[in-house]
Image (cartoon, coloured by chain):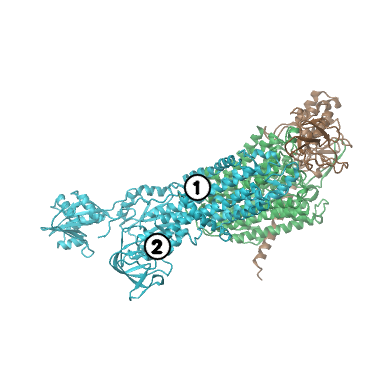
Chain colours: A green, B brown, C cyan
């Protein structure tokens, strides 16, 4: 009961902030004015804030920024031993460095390393956490640019990336993080530059209590749906998630931006009801997923959970099973990937749900920005099929979905399944699945999970598998890189294509995209078209394990 | 001189990255490090360290082991949950076991480095040990009386079907927990053999242990972080008689202490009731 | 006066061949279907091409490693491809019959040039001038530049009644292959060699060089993407299957899975079942059949694109006369002048109209109510026909002459103007009516008020249009007051009064700038710019060559209301595609539930719980799915050819209906179908 109340309060809280926070973000991205700091940033960066960019220029800006970020981060972790606050750790080896650099720039935050033993404080805060901010801002910027494609009337331009990046970072992400950091510190998260404190336990042993600027990183880790933990144990670690209520707050922060962006979408296209329809699709999928995950975990099927009497392995006492399961769903419904309990030890079907969430393409509500554009692409595909069924050339928000649009949208939804499936098959074909800790179907799940997580830029793991080998670091790095930037470029190209069109006015003959019927249809397309692709693979992993 | 567009774009990108690194990577976290120095907040920012006399004995947020140098439980203290962090409660190596729900077959080997226990066997062994320590019945479903997973490899004539031809108790090298299965005598396992690969069907045997074992779930499972500072009130209560005995307290006194250190659900619905072990043990030491 | 009886005002749509196909049609199309197995033809349809490759692959496997199961699967995979080709062949076959009829009309005719030379019709060039006399076939498309003739156009329109073609004006265009019945005309050829109307029509109905329409291309992209996805999902399964089989060493080999992974036969079966074969197989048949439906309604679309655009139309521009109102005005009132009784006027009007076969004339007789016209009713009566010169018609009786006609002409005939009559004439004009003055020798008797009559049922149709989200706009040369009165009566959304060709063009541009698609009909040369500008321009076959060139469709019946049907056909075409796509994708759910447990339950018996249909064995389950997948194509051929039922309604109502039928139906039907097939085939030995 308490578990359901936990979910219900989250839903209510997110519903309450939808309008005000969505409106606020709308003003941030659409407002004409910049504040002093922002103008300062533009000057330092050397960009003209009034320059409107076509999709090509916008995409090149995103790619340039991300490329520079990857190189910078790669160099940073390779050279960390030469810098301050390194805590004496070694430089990160090249394949983990590549993997980490790609991982944080792509908003994945897959961690092929263990934070407390691999990364110094400076790298964590000035390298990794900076990417937590800007990779999130990039996602939101691209989503906003995409929506501008719908809103544009033959202009062909999508705004200015540098302006979007700056405003979103400084006016959306930073202020909320400031508040969240303070709250987290009050809850007991550490925030220092200490290398740790040795203590003598009650029975006389020595324990090294770690330190670090954790609270400030934790706030953006959740808010930006990044998920890269300061410590290996991530949000299960008492310093990253000290209490049951910080657990609630973290889930709230994870969902905050992705669930409010549809409001921005609605405002930008001038029809709030379109935003409600999109958020309804997200909510239906998310609530169903959370409910199923919690139900599977509470039920506790499987030999070990039955022997134990509960699926408590890998879960913290203070959170308990339902709140852990809710977190698992939240972190995979978005592109967060933080964990407060270890999915590998979940019941077979409970552990399948995080995978399914990611396989849906992380659209319910998905990562910051990427969730919105992902779902809108699915909506475009839905509109196409449904639009034909009402006897017109399909159009979404007045923009015709023709051959070019379908080419881009189809490619978009091809990419992640392709990466997941090819990666998983490659691991098995080459025998690299052998680093999986568990055997049989569960070992298969670990491999499948790894590629699903990387390709969808989630970053959570069935953590049993050992992935800091050159093959895994390279393969997953590629999955993350392609899984992030190919869809992103396609989405911007689609936006460019839409932006060049004039809008067809709505009429009785237009497919209504704000009604429950359409909401149900998008849900159906998402489940049937996307999830079913993975059913054969799932059958040999979690389903084989769970249906026995 | 005019630079090519692609270059100016990358230069802008680099400048933007540097600006944000200074702003978000230095100014923002360091500001909070500074705020963390504020009295009232500094304790928490430093890790909620607990000091007894001159000694820092731990963090109230981080669990620790209450074992002697050999790893045996110190009976004077409430015991924490099992931990997969390093050798147990090692904050420099936080981790979960990551073993799956069907991790039921041990790898048996003459060489201890090659051997590994399945999650099921770990659970069974812990249950047995806790039962012994607390003087209660440590039996669980799917566990043998000697504290390993009760799992058979059953060989059928036609693979998955047909009459049983051979049965091996895969986690036991001694006397199998069952004399016969399907009319066939159960053999003990031999080291280094993978009976599933030999064609056996892995079959966990439920046994007749009560479905709600006396030893609670958190006592036999490792947490996610390996640093879980809490145990369930049920596990604390289970340990109460031993603590009372060892500490010369009445059972009621111990129960009262437990109740005092039990955090209910926050706001009545967040999380689960939990007992902070370090604080509870400190209060025992304080008595 | 017209030579011909007017067609009934509102034509009931021609009975169109239903989509039902006779078994013999399938047989006849079979050779064509087999010819299409040529990979060079198949690859244009990527979905079915994959199936064909799969069929070849399983054939090889069946030969190298024969089994009953392998051979049955192979046969059914080939049947799947053949069925798909059959759908296309049947659709094309219907067109071929029409093409044959058209070719008959296109026999090599001899053209007589104006200078008397005789050349073969095929050698005619643009600009050649030919003479055609009664009994000859017009050798090519062109405009009459001299003379008037009645022409039998039944070869292309199917309409047996002859039509008039004359030089100048809007009825000057003639079509090659039609036959002059009377008189002599001189025609300037406007077609290029080999590009005559009939040539194009043949190409069109045969589906030769059929260009894919924009929506079809977009849909093909989606289908290709789905195909790639499912290909990947199946191919990448192999290493996982090998791993799983090796892990569970106890699992016996089955038809579906052995130590080398999923067997080739089953892998191909899974791919074929998952990729959208249903829509892939029927897509081109749907397109061909859509064009065919238009042709059957005697509309000739120059491109499939135009047909699709018709479904998208937001604004319909409709000419008032002939479309919204009856082609001709009807007598509504007799207004006698001072000193003449209404009865006198009625009687005179009656007499003058007895021989007037125009609808106006008949309506006057009807309004007078003095009995039917019968030849020889009035002895010695000499009827004076209407001519463009006199602009009057009437009757000469022994003791009096009666005339009726345009005010000015009759006044002139009477010899003195009357202010009273002028006043009445002005009043009627102001009300949007047409005054017809009746006079007898020496004096005007009164005026007949001819009024526009809105066709029955038009209001309901416009309401339908509105529900479909289409605005109707009435175009008329009338003054705004009259136009508004008629617009209100007809229930159109807007009107354009005193419309000049420039006005029409401007109106279309304005609509298009607002993002709307515009459809219109036209026949005159001055309609050409507007027809060209409109997204869907339907030229009347009776119209000028210029109009026919400018528009992207030609209505052979020259029925302006056809536009509404064209819109419906366009919509139906898209709906059919959408519905079958939905159906095809929904089918996958059941197929998963059939094939996945069949493949893997042998390794992980728990997966048997997914076998919710309780299919007999792995072999029968896979076979049932493959057979269902093939049969559903045949079962849906009639639907693809006929188009899904379309009733004008709002988009949300349409979506809801089609989603229930094709979405939910697509989910449920294969469960039933596969189970049923499984019940039958489990008795085949070896399955």
Q: Which residue is mark 1?
A: A512
Residue C673 versus residue C465: which sits nearer the camera? C673
**In the shown orientation, is residue B26 left or right of residue A265?**
right
Label 2 neighbour load within 10 Å: few <14, some 14-19, many 20+: few
Residue A344, by quadrant, is top right
The image quadrant where one finds the N terminus of chain C is bottom left
Camera-nearest residue between C249 and B63:
C249
A413, B104: nearer the viewer: B104
CB within 8 Å, label 2 to label 1: no
Q: Which label number is shown at residue A448?
A: none
Can you name the residue that lies furthest to the left here? C399
Question: How far across and down, in percent of the image, does residue C210 sit?
Answer: 49, 60
Disc 1 residue crowd, few under 14, some 14–19, many 20+, Cα 10 Å: many
Q: Badge 2 sits on which subunit?
A: C
Element type at marker 2? Answer: helix
Residue C532: x %, y % from top left: 42, 63
Q: Examine the rendering and report whether any part of residue B203 can be seen.
A: yes
Q: Position of residue C506 (x, y in %)?
A: 40, 61
State the image coordinates of residue A458 (x, y, percent, origin top left): 68, 48
**Which image quadrant for residue B253?**
top right
Q: Is residue C666 above or below residue C400?
A: above
Would you name the residue on which mark 2 appears? Answer: C104
Q: Residue at x 39, y 68 (%)?
A: C108
Q: How many marks?
A: 2
Would you say A35 lies left or right of B185 here? left
Task: Give the Cα separation between the discs numbered 2 and 1.
Answer: 49 Å
Tell which subunit mark 1 falls on.
A
Label 1: which secondary element = loop
Residue at the front extreme of this rendering: C685
């Amino acid at each position: 009961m308490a578990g359901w109340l936990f979910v219900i309060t989250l839903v209510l809280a997110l519903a309450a902030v939808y309008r005000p926070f969505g409106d606020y973000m709308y003003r941030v991205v659409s407002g004409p004015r910049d504040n002093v700091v922002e103008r300062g940033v533009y000057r330092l960066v050397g960009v003209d804030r009034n320059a409107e960019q076509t999709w090509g220029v916008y995409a090149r800006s995103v790619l340039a920024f991300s490329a520079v970020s990857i190189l910078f981060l790669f160099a940073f972790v390779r050279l960390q031993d030469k810098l301050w606050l390194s805590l004496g750790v070694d430089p990160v080896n090249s394949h983990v460095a590549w993997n980490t650099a790609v991982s944080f720039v792509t908003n994945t935050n897959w961690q092929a390393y263990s934070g407390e033993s691999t990364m110094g404080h400076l790298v964590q805060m000035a390298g990794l956490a900076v990417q937590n901010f800007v990779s999130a801002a990039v996602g939101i910027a691209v989503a906003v640019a995409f929506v501008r494609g719908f809103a544009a009337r033959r202009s062909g331009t999508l705004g200015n990336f540098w302006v979007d990046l700056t405003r979103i970072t400084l006016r959306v992400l930073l202020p909320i993080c400031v508040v969240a950091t303070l709250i987290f510190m009050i809850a007991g998260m550490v925030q220092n530059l200490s290398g740790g404190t040795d203590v003598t336990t009650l029975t006389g042993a020595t324990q090294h209590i770690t330190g670090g600027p954790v609270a400030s990183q934790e706030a953006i880790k959740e808010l930006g749906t990044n998920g890269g933990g300061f410590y290996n144990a991530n949000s299960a670690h008492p310093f990253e998630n000290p209490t049951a209520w910080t657990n609630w707050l973290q889930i709230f922060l994870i969902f905050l931006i992705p669930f409010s962006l549809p409001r921005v979408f609605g405002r930008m296209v001038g029809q709030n009801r379109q935003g409600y329809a999109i958020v309804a699709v997200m909510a239906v999928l998310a609530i169903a997923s959370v409910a199923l995950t919690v139900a599977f975990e509470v039920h506790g099927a499987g030999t070990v959970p039955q022997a134990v009497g509960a699926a408590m392995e890998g879960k913290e006492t203070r959170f308990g099973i339902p709140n852990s399961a809710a977190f698992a769903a939240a972190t995979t419904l978005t592109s967060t990937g933080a964990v407060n309990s270890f999915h590998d030890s979940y019941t077979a079907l409970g552990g399948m749900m995080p995978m399914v969430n990611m396989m849906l393409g992380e659209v319910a509500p998905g990562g910051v920005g990427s969730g919105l554009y992902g779902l809108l692409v699915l909506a475009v595909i839905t509109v196409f099929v449904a639009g034909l069924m009402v006897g017109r050339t399909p159009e979404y928000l007045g923009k015709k979905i023709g051959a070019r649009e379908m080419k881009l949208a189809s490619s978009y939804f091809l990419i992640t399944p392709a990466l997941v499936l090819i990666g998983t098959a490659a691991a098995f074909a080459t025998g690299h699945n052998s680093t999986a800790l568990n055997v049989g179907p569960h070992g298969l799940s670990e491999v499948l999970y790894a590629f699903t997580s990387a390709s969808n830029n989630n970053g959570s793991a069935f953590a049993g598998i050992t992935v800091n080998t050159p093959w895994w670091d390279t393969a997953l790095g590629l999955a993350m890189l392609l899984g992030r930037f190919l869809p992103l470029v396609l989405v911007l190209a689609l936006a460019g294509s839409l932006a060049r069109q004039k809008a067809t006015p709505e009429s009785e003959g237009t497919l209504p995209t704000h009604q429950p019927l359409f909401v149900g249809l998008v849900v159906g397309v998402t489940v049937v078209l996307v999830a079913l692709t993975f059913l054969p693979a799932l059958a040999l992993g979690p389903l084989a394990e769970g249906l026995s | 001189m005019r630079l090519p567009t692609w270059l100016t774009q990358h230069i802008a990108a680099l400048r933007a990255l540097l600006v944000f690194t200074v702003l978000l990577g230095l100014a923002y976290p360091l500001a909070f490090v500074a705020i963390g120095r504020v009295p009232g907040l500094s304790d928490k920012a430093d890790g909620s360290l607990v000091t007894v006399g001159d000694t820092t004995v731990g963090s109230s947020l981080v669990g620790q082991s209450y074992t002697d140098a050999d790893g045996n439980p110190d009976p004077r203290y409430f015991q924490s949950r099992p931990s997969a962090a390093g050798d147990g409660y090692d904050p420099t190596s936080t981790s979960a076991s990551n073993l799956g729900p069907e991790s039921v077959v041990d790898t048996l080997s003459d060489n201890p480095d090659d051997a590994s226990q399945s999650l099921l066997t770990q659970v069974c062994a812990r249950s047995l040990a806790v039962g012994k320590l607390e003087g209660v019945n440590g039996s669980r479903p799917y566990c043998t009386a000697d504290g390993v997973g009760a799992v058979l490899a059953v060989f059928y004539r036609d693979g998955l079907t047909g009459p049983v031809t051979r049965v091996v108790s895969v986690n036991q090298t001694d006397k199998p927990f069952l004399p016969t299965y399907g009319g066939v005598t159960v053999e003990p396992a031999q080291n280094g053999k993978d009976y599933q690969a030999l064609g056996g069907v892995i079959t966990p045997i439920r046994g007749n242990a009560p479905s709600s074992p006396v030893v609670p779930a958190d006592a036999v499972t490792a947490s996610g972080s390996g640093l879980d500072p809490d145990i369930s009130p049920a596990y604390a209560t289970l340990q109460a008689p031993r603590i009372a005995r060892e500490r010369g307290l009445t059972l009621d006194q111990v129960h009262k202490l437990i109740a005092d250190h039990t955090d209910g659900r926050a706001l009545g619905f967040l999380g689960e009731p939990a007992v902070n072990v370090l604080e509870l043990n400190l209060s025992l030491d304080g008595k | 006066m017209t030579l011909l009886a007017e067609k009934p005002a509102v034509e009931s749509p021609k009975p169109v061949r239903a989509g039902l196909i006779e078994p013999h049609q399938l047989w006849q199309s079979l050779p064509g279907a087999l010819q299409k197995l040529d990979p060079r033809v198949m690859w244009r349809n990527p979905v079915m091409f994959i199936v064909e490759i799969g069929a070849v692959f399983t054939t090889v496997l069946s030969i190298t490693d024969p089994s009953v199961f392998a051979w049955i699967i192979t046969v059914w995979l080939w049947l799947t491809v053949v069925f798909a080709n059959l759908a296309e062949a049947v659709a094309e076959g219907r067109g071929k019959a029409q093409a044959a009829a058209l070719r008959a009309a296109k026999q090599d005719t001899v053209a007589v040039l104006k200078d008397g030379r005789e050349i073969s019709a095929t050698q005619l060039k643009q600009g050649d001038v030919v003479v055609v006399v009664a009994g000859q076939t017009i050798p090519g498309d062109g405009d009459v530049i001299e003379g008037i003739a009645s022409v039998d156009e039944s070869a292309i329109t199917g309409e047996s009644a002859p039509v008039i073609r004359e030089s100048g004006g809007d009825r000057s265009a003639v079509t090659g292959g039609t036959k002059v019945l009377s008189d002599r005309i001189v025609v300037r050829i406007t077609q290029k060699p080999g590009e005559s109307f009939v040539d194009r029509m043949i190409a069109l109905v045969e589906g030769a060089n059929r260009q894919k329409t924009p929506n079809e291309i977009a849909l093909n992209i989606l289908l290709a993407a789905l195909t790639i996805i499912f290909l990947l999902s199946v191919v990448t399964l192999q290493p996982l299957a090998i791993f799983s089989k090796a892990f569970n060493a106890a699992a016996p080999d089955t038809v579906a899975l052995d130590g080398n992974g999923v067997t080739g036969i089953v892998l191909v079966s899974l791919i074929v079942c998952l990729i959208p074969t249903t829509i892939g197989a029927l897509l081109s048949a749907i397109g061909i059949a859509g064009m065919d439906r238009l042709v059957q309604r005697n509309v000739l679309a120059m491109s499939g694109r135009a047909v699709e655009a018709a479904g998208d139309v937001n604004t319909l521009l409709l000419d008032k006369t002939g479309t919204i109102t009856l082609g001709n005005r009807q007598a509504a009132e007799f207004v006698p002048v001072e000193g003449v009784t209404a009865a006198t006027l009625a009687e005179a009007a009656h007499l003058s109209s007895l021989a007037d076969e125009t609808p106006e004339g008949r309506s006057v007789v009807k309004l007078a109510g003095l009995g039917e016209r019968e030849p020889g009713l009035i002895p010695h009566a000499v009827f004076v026909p209407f001519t463009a010169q006199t602009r009057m018609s009437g009757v000469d009786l022994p003791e009096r002459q009666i005339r009726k006609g345009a005010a000015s002409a009759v006044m002139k005939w009477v010899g003195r103007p009357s202010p009273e009559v002028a006043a009445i004439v002005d009043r009627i004009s102001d009300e949007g009516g047409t005054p017809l003055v009746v006079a007898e020798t020496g004096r005007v008797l009164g005026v007949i008020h001819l009024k526009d009559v809105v066709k029955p049922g038009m209001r309901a149709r416009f309401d339908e249009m509105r529900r479909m989200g289409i605005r109707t706009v009435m175009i008329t040369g009338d003054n705004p007051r009259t136009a508004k009165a008629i617009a209100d009566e007809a229930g159109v959304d807007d009107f354009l009064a005193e419309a000049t060709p420039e006005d029409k063009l401007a109106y279309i541009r304005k609509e298009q700038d607002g993002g709307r698609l515009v459809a219109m009909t036209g026949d005159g040369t001055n309609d050409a710019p507007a027809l060209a500008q409109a997204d869907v321009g339907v030229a009347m076959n009776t119209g000028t060559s210029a109009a026919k060139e400018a528009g992207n469709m030609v209505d052979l019946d020259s029925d302006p209301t056809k536009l509404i049907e064209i819109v419906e056909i366009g919509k139906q075409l898209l709906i059919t595609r959408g519905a079958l796509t939905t159906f095809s994708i929904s089918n996958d759910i059941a197929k998963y539930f059939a094939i996945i447990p069949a493949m893997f339950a042998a390794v992980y018996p728990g997966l048997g719980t997914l076998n919710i249909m309780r299919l007999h064995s792995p072999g029968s389950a896979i076979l049932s799915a493959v057979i269902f997948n093939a049969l559903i194509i045949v079962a849906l051929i009639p639907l693809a050819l006929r188009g899904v039922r379309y009733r004008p309604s709002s988009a949300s109502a349409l979506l809801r209906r089609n989603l229930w039928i094709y979405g939910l139906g697509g989910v449920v039907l294969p469960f039933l179908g596969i189970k049923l097939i499984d019940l039958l085939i489990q008795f085949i030995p070896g399955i």
